[in-house]
């Protein structure tokens, strides 16, 4: 006997939902890159409001439901707080440029290394696993704090969390792949790196995370090719660097948007940059910075062993210089570069001293 | 195919476009105008979506349009291309990123100096590497 419910013959379907809808008749056409988020920014669906009162998780453009619970408690409800012009582009790029830490790294090329080199790789891998943890946790908190009306930056940050998750696992895998293991926790997540999480404003967070923090990590990943001892390590650093460059791009484009649209916040943002630069000068959040376990490990890897520490240290200083140069150029690209010409930033002085 | 020439870069593009494996493993959507400076010869190479849509020889001043351009002496280009040909891909010493790091002033430059655009060299690095690795399948002769 069938268990399907038997409806009385006179029961009618309630099709009221069919009349409740957003703008109708949309016909998005795929572009050269497939059907992207940019291709569906059509009609009223493409316009995020300047201020959102959406606390119910209603997808942007859908019809509102009067009896919805206020599930969100979203704190970021102003477009200007989180916006950037190319979030959907960066999101699609993230989707299409994913890689697998299990199969896209030629793990078989890792062969036994000298003890001091293996220990240094493992120390660095421990440090990076720890840092990636923060880089995933912090944006995740902001995603859940942002109204769904600004889904473009939200989705970009969601993709970042996925990237950071892969970075976390790939360094953990490296530490466990070649006779070593995880080493001493740096404590960095409780210190300066952790302070990224204390930011109460999205732009403050983004200036610390995307521009100064991940900008510095991007340089480390790129330099990773100099301290890689096999194709697997080269691939790890190269692929992580690509992801990192995308996260940095998010920060640069958000800050550029703030520069163009929020003149009343310029001085406040300059203060965030003051603070970021104090940390760059102190060097403590930065494995290429002052003496830390991670910076010693880097110097050993770059030099080619404990006995060549000084060579490694010289390369490390070159890396640090490049980190600062690239940071300065990125901030200039956002529009906030006057600080390097009017004496506000001490970084230019630091570079001049290094050159002298 | 003679290097450097417009037809060499386009032949590499054809190999690159014809092999779907170059779209995975960290490759994929790539949108940039890359320049290549080989001595006094200059080229612009366009990447759109998952394709390299073409290369053309240009005057030096036109490199300004590039997001970044790769600048090496002809002998260094030759060493890189020969290394790729003999391994099937660039080995440890000849990846673009390593060549960039080996040079005091780097391999990738720009006329405009905008770091956001220069960063595309890092953001798309694997795709650019795949592109040059594809040259292993183009029989190459050297000279002007
Ligand atoms: Fe990361
Ligand atoms: Fe990141």
Image: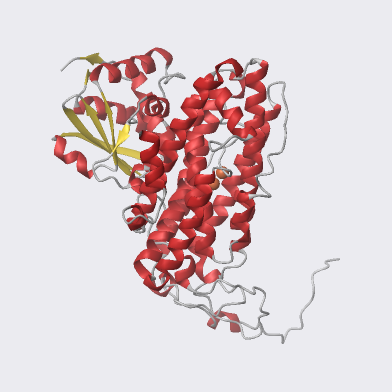
- Quadrant in which residue A356 is drawn: top left
- The x and y percentages for residue A33 are 39, 49
Give the total of numbered labels: 0
Q: Can the viewer see residue A215?
A: yes
Please name the residue shown 42% across and 20% down the image.
B90
Tell me the colour scheme of the image: secondary structure
Ligand 1 picture quarter: top right
- The x and y percentages for residue B50 are 38, 41
Relative vertical location of residue A261 with respect to residue B144 in this rendering, above or below: below
The single residue placed furthest to the right in the displayed view is A1
Residue closer to the observer: A270 or A222: A270
Relative vertical location of residue A278 with respect to residue A218 in this rendering, above or below: below
- Quadrant in which residue B113 is drawn: top left
In this image, A184 relative to B70: left or right?
Answer: right
Please name the residue shown 71% across and 85% down the image.
A11
The quadrant of the picture occupied by the N terminus of chain B is top left
Relative vertical location of residue A27 with respect to residue A19 in this rendering, above or below: above
Residue closer to the observer: A25 or A282: A282
The quadrant of the picture occupied by the C terminus of chain B is top left
Please name the residue shown 45% across and 63% down the image.
A269
- The x and y percentages for residue A19 are 53, 83
Residue closer to the observer: B67 or A309: A309
In this image, A137 relative to B72: left or right?
Answer: right
- The x and y percentages for residue A190 are 68, 50
Q: Can the viewer see residue B50?
A: no
Residue closer to the observer: A166 or B118: B118
């Amino acid at each position: 006997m069938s268990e399907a419910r038997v409806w009385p013959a006179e029961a009618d379907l309630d099709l009221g939902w069919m009349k409740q809808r957003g703008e109708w008749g949309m016909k998005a056409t795929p572009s050269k890159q497939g059907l992207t988020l940019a291709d569906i920014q059509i009609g009223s669906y493409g316009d995020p409001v300047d201020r959102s009162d959406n606390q119910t998780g209603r997808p942007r453009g859908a019809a509102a439901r009067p009896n919805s619970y206020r599930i969100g408690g979203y704190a970021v409800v102003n477009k200007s707080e989180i916006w950037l012009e190319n979030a959907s582009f960066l999101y699609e790029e993230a989707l299409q440029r994913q890689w697998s830490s299990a199969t896209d790294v030629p793990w078989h090329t890792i062969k036994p290394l000298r003890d001091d080199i293996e220990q240094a790789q493992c120390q660095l891998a421990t440090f990076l696993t720890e840092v990636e943890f923060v880089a995933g946790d912090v944006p995740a908190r902001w995603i859940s704090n942002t109204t769904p009306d600004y889904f473009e930056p939200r989705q970009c940050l969601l993709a970042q969390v996925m990237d950071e998750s892969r970075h976390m696992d790939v360094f953990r895998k490296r530490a466990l792949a070649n006779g070593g293991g995880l080493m001493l926790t740096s404590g960095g997540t409780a210190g300066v790196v952790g302070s990224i999480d204390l930011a109460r404003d999205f732009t403050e967070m983004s200036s610390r995370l995307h521009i100064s923090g991940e900008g510095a990590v991007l340089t480390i990943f790129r330099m990773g090719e100099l301290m890689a001892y096999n194709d697997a390590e080269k691939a790890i650093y190269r692929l992580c660097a690509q992801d990192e460059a995308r996260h940095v791009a998010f920060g640069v484009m958000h800050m550029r948007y703030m520069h163009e649209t929020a003149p009343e916040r310029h001085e406040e943002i300059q203060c965030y940059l003051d603070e970021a630069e104090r940390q760059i000068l102190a060097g403590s959040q930065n494995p290429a910075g002052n003496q830390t376990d991670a910076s010693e490990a880097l110097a050993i890897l770059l030099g080619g062993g404990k006995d060549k520490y000084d060579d490694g240290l010289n390369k490390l200083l070159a890396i640090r210089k490049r980190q600062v140069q690239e940071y300065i150029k990125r901030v200039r690209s956002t529009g906030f570069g006057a600080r390097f010409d009017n004496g506000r930033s001490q970084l230019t002085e630091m570079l001049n001293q290094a050159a002298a | 195919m003679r290097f450097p020439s417009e037809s060499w870069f386009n032949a590499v593009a054809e190999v690159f476009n014809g092999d779907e494996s170059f779209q995975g493993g960290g490759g994929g959507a790539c949108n940039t105008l890359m320049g290549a400076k080989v001595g006094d010869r200059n080229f612009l190479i366009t990447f759109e979506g998952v394709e390299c849509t073409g290369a053309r020889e240009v005057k030096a001043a036109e490199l300004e349009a590039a997001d970044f351009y790769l600048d090496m002496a002809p002998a260094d280009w030759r060493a890189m291309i020969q290394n790729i040909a003999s391994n099937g891909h660039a080995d440890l010493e000849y990846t673009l990123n390593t060549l960039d790091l080996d040079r005091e002033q780097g391999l990738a430059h720009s006329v405009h100096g905008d770091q956001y655009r220069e960063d595309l060299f890092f953001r798309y690095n694997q795709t650019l590497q795949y592109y040059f690795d594809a040259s292993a399948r183009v029989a190459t002769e050297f000279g002007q």
